Amino acid sequence: LDIVVICAALSATLVEAGSAPVEADSDYDKVVKIVSDHTIVINNETVQWGYFSKNVSPVLKVSSGSIVTVEMATNHACDDWDKMIKGDSGMESVFTSTPEVKNETERGATGSIDGAHILTGPIYVKEAMPGDILKVEILDLYPRKNPYGKSFGSNAASKEDGGLFTSRSFSETPSQKDEYVTIYEVIESDDGDYVTPSYQFEWPNITDPNGIHRDFIAYPATCVPHDAHGDTVPSDRVSARGWTKKDKITYYDEPYPVKIPVNYHVGCMGLPPASHNSIDSIPPMPTGGNLDNKRIGIGITMYYPVEVAGGLLSMGDAHVAQGDSELGGTGIDISITGDFKLTLIRKADFVPWQEQLDFPLGETELEYIVHGSTETDYLETFSKDPSDIYGASSIDKAMKNAYAQTKKFMIARWDLTEMEATTIITQAVDFGVTQLANGNLGVHGTIPKNIFPDWGETSDADKSKEEGYGEESKKGGRGLLAYFFMTFVGLIIIVGFAYIFVVLVK
């Protein structure tokens, strides 16, 4: 009996220590399924706005194999302050902008032609060195809810980076401002969560608290001072901070009630390059960045070539939905939280295909996803002025590069000849337009695994679960350790009861 009491006490102590599933706080209304080793909360001190940089101090240092929970904010949240920022201290910290206090003092690293994305990070992975690969597994993604328990996102049909494929290019009035925004609401349903339009509005001519005229959407952190419309009476949070507009906004309060299935994915995730001190977050690069591939969601494993010590992983620009091509300029941008496992693959342990990796590769249970861009490394092609990529993009070159990368990867992965790779690619690999919005235009190729004889064997993504480096690398860290401990305690309890039963029978 004493054994049973002791075992029960041990079990209770372990539960109180936090090993059991924990009810999440009211912000997310979610049961935590993954025990993470670290969490990065969103605020103005844990983000960089519009750029990747090797010179930014990391907000977190982790060992290989760590699971990290990361909060991400959409840079379009201020399209509707009341729905996506109000009452959320983290979001308000990021978006505060008044004549007296402006937490984000400049656009990007230089305040000139940098990108728009709010990137959480960077995360320093211990022992990661140039030439290694950082493997990032997306374990879970879930929306950030406002204080009223709802989640909203924004889709901006915009000129954004001034590239070739913009909303106005397809309109009958290409010389006129025709940008507009659609605010979507996430609806949770037993038949599957979806998003549906809440309302739309035409982009107004806005002046920010510092007197800068923002007459198009490209400026990040622009806050819209809304008028009353439909059943909505906006707060004065935006106008009270000094944001004004020239005319009343034109609203469309009853958009077609389409139901678009939820597909949370991370639009911009990657590592800074070694070649430049800081670079625009918009064009994709060999170390990742703004791929805007709707497949980079739950269950995918991404492989990023490391160019600087620690890797310095940052992420943001999350979407709740987006079609291939991202034709109008953005997906449905939304603030989310994600759980990621970070594993270092050292150069000394590379398999053949990893030795040749010079692009961000995706892997799921069923396929590999190869990414090709107009320029595989636009920072090398346009080293003196990387912004030149915006005027040099070509979807034809992106297709050629996607094919070349796919062939190179398949030859290395399955030891094929060029002839074998070419015929397999032609018959079995699907290519699609990833995005037409990010300067360095993108095409992806999806390679099905089940056509190869080694289908069903341990995948490249799974191998890391059997390997890893650092103190937290083994099988998900302390969460799994607690599981084994609980199992051990359970066995002891069973043995104890069996012993008591035998004694009573005697």
Image: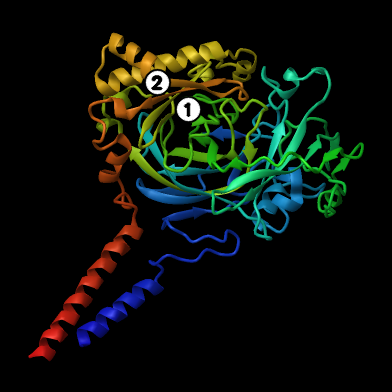
Residue 72 place in picture, x, y as percent: 58, 46
Task: Report which residue position mark 2 lands on.
Answer: 429
* Above or below 132: residue 121: below
Cα gap from disc 2 to disc 1, whole angstroms: 33 Å
Given contact means CB atoms under 8 Å apart, are the residues at marks 2 and 1 in contact? no
Residue drawn at x 35%, y 59% as measured from the top left: 479
Position of the N terminus by quadrant: bottom left
- Relative to residue 271, is residue 226 depicted above or below? below
The location of residue 499, given as percent across then percent down, is: 13, 82
State how many labels appear: 2
As helix, strand or loop, the secondary structure at mark 2 comes to loop
Horizontally, residue 345 falls left or right of residue 253, namely left
The kind of residue on which mark 1 rests is Ala
User: Of marks 2 and 1, which one's residue comes earlier in the chain?
Assistant: 1
Q: Which residue is mark 1?
A: 274
Label 1: which secondary element: loop
- Dot 2: within a 10 Å radius of its alpha carbon, few (fewer than 14), some, or many (20 or more) residues? some
Say which of 27 and 477 sits in front: 27
Residue 397 appears in the rendering: yes
Residue at x 26% of width, y 28% of height: 351
Residues 367 and 477: in front is: 367
Residue 337 as seen in the image, left or right of residue 428: right
Residue 325 in the image: above or below residue 500: above
Q: Is residue 414 above or below residue 243?
A: above
